[in-house]
Image: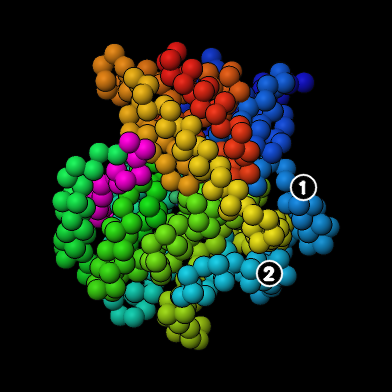
Amino acid sequence: METSLLTVDHRHIWHPFTQMKEHEQDPPVLVTGAEGCDLLLEGGRRVLDGISSWWTNIHGHGHPRLVEAMGRQGARIDHVMFAGFTHAPAIELVARLQPKLPPNLTRCFFSDNGSTAVEVALKMAFQAQLQQGRAGRTRFGALAEGYHGDTLGAVAVGELDNFLTGIFRPLLAACDRLVVPEDPRRELHPDLDGWDAKLAGALEDVRAFFAEHGDRMAAFIAEPLLQAAGGMRMWPVEVLRELRTQCDRHGVYLILDEVMTGFGRTGTLFTYGQSEVEPDFMCLSKGLTGGILPLSLTWTTDEVYGRFWGDYADGLAFLHGHSYTANPLACAVACAGLRLFDEEPVLARAQALGAAMREAWGGLADHPAVRRTRSLGTVVACQVVDPATGRPHLAAERFPWKFHRKGLDHGLLVRPIGDCLYLMPPLATPPERIPEAVATIRRLLDEA
Ligand SMILES: Cc1ncc(COP(=O)(O)O)c(C=O)c1O
């Protein structure tokens, strides 16, 4: 049975982020079950989901309350179009979530993945500028090394030199990129020599960037404090605050992409809360449903909403939507996940998990292959070098893939991004599981 499944997979399925030729020798692994913080693989292997299944899983796989909410909702309304109709799960979701957000974010637009949440924010920001007579705001600003998804708008504001996305350059909206430094204060063994001057320089760079590009940008987008796909780059809160100041000064909307950082991942429910910065748009997805169903939200302000207010004849409406906008099952599961945050000490448990991760990860710092161990909430990361050269492994060595495959043999799902090795298990992972996971990583590094 399993063999025939893989045969059909091989014949017909094109997997994401994959050079399919690699699967000729090394086929995809059949997942047969998911329980709590573990995945069950064909042949009976059990692995810790050390990257939360692409950063989605929060409460653990198959959480009974989320699964029950899905079943209950399925029996009531499975799906209905969201133009001209509404339903209780969507209404309950926004009512539960809005008080947890920056108070200025009062208006919510539904879509179904992180990329579309970003597309919506970009399009709304552009149109809102246009509708206040600023037709020249045709560009976006973004952080270098950012990642916001794989649709063309999201690619336009991401780092084009990663993931081969540069080839799409001729098709993309115009974007200027601001380089920001990583924050050494997140490192477990920081060297803060010269940091004050570097930080002052970074703030000056923000001001210079806006002086040059500020009057032609519709919006500036950033992943708050943690650029995940860019290689778990943890950047300074002071820079985020300066971005807010400069956006205000230059009439540029600030979009915070909390698709990955939301729902407790960095230690607070949302990461903006660590900065007191209130964005004009916030994009949420991934952990929104606890990692069970696709759903996303783009939140914005009354000010932006007001720019679209009028009669059809005025041509102001935001004419955007998706077939599965506000899918009731996904909304019901998201509500159940938020109820867990309210009724159980999810964040306190995440803090205990984060502390266990930081402590265990610190023990890797003396490994000859490891540089710059760092942590933020329940994310720990480091850079891996070839101990023989002290430099990152050559791309041709396929270090991240080999490390990932070996990890599965040792009971751990990890998937380095280039030379960045990180661990980001579900928030519900028992802290006692962490020392073993980090010991496994040490063994894998010894063998790499
Ligand atoms: C910060 C950020 N934004 C957007 C996305 C895109 O989300 P999706 O993969 O659901 O389209 C991701 C995905 O990793 C992300 O990390």
Q: Is residue 15 left or right of residue 34?
A: left
Residue at (50, 64) in percent of width and height? 298
Q: Name the residue tied to disc 1.
A: 64
Residue 138 makes an appearance in the image: no
- Of discs 1 and 2, which sits in the foreground? 1
User: Residue 214 occupies which quadrant of the picture?
Assistant: bottom left
105 or 396, which is in the foreground?
Answer: 105
On screen, residue 297 versus residue 145, left or right, reads right
Screen quadrant of the C terminus: top left
The kind of secondary structure element at disc 2 is helix
Is residue 218 depicted above or below 308 in this figure?
above
Q: Quadrant of the N terminus?
A: top right
Residue 256 in the image: state x and y as whole percent. 41, 60
Locate residue 336, reporting x and y percent: 71, 58
* Residue 400 falls left or right of residue 329: left
Amino acid at circle 1: Pro
Q: Nearer the viewer, residue 432 or 263?
A: 432
Residue 92 marker:
2
Q: Which element type, helix, strand or loop, lies under badge 1?
A: helix
Q: Residues within 10 Å of mark 1 (few under 14, many from 20)?
A: few
Magenta residues span 174-189
> Which residue is more in the foreground, 395 or 314?
395
Q: Residue at x 35, y 53 (%)?
A: 157
Between 133 and 191, the one lying in front of the other is 191
| Residue 212 seen in the current view | yes
